[in-house]
């Protein structure tokens, strides 16, 4: 059986996240989004984004890395400005899927910035 391997990072809110004022939180969020945009442009991340309707409120988002190893994906995930700032924690694992299945579009959604 042929499979493709990606590294999956779960982004979780820590039980006691570091507190910041609103201006700093906005800056951290901007840096977080810019960081992931850059990783997508470099093709190190296939896709990433927030989650909703989850049963575990600590789960905030997912990132699918394409970098070859859990160790490298963990290093990239831990360099995320929101992780460095103590606002998120990461769990990283290997994810397998049938070849070419990461290509279909999802249902469109528009959110306000």
Image (spheres, rainbow, N blue to C red):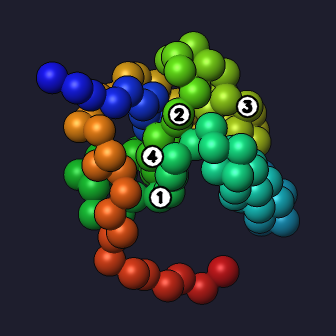
Quarter where residue 5 is shown: top left
Q: Position of residue 61 (x, y in %)?
A: 46, 50
**Placement of 24 over or under 111, stated as above or below:** above
Q: CA distance from mark 2 to mark 1?
A: 18 Å
- Name the residue beneath numbered marker 3: 79
Q: Looking at the image, is mark 2 or mark 1 nearer the viewer?
A: 2
Circle 3: is it few (<14), some (14-19), or many (20+) Cα within 10 Å? some
Locate the C terminus and report the quarter of the image it occupies: bottom right
Q: Looking at the image, is mark 3 or mark 2 nearer the viewer?
A: 2
Q: Position of residue 4 (x, y in %)?
A: 34, 30
Q: Is residue 84 left or right of residue 11?
A: right
CB under 8 Å between discs 4 and 3: no
Helix, strand or loop at label 1? It is: strand
Mark identifier at residue 50: 1
Q: Nearer the viewer, residue 21 or 6?
A: 6
CB under 8 Å between discs 3 and 1: no
Q: CA distance from mark 4 to mark 3?
A: 15 Å
Residue 14 seen from this side = no
Q: Nearer the viewer, residue 70 or 43?
A: 43
Helix, strand or loop at label 2? It is: loop
Mark identifier at residue 66: 2
Which residue is at a point 58% across and 27% down the rendered structure image?
Answer: 67
Question: Which badge, 3 or 1, comes first in the chain's sequence?
Answer: 1
Question: Which badge, 2 or 1, comes first in the chain's sequence?
Answer: 1
**Placement of 40 over or under 4, stated as above or below:** below
């Amino acid at each position: 059986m042929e499979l493709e391997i990606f590294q999956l990072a779960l982004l979780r809110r820590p039980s006691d996240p570091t507190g910041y004022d609103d201006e700093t939180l906005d800056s951290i969020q901007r840096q977080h989004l810019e960081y992931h945009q850059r990783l997508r442009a470099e093709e190190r991340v296939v896709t990433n984004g927030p989650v909703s309707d989850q049963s575990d409120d600590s789960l905030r988002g997912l990132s699918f890395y394409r970098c070859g190893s859990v160790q490298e994906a963990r290093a990239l995930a831990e360099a995320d400005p929101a992780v460095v700032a103590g606002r998120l924690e990461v769990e990283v694992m290997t994810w397998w899927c049938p070849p070419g299945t990461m290509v279909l579009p999802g249902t469109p959604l528009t959110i306000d910035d």
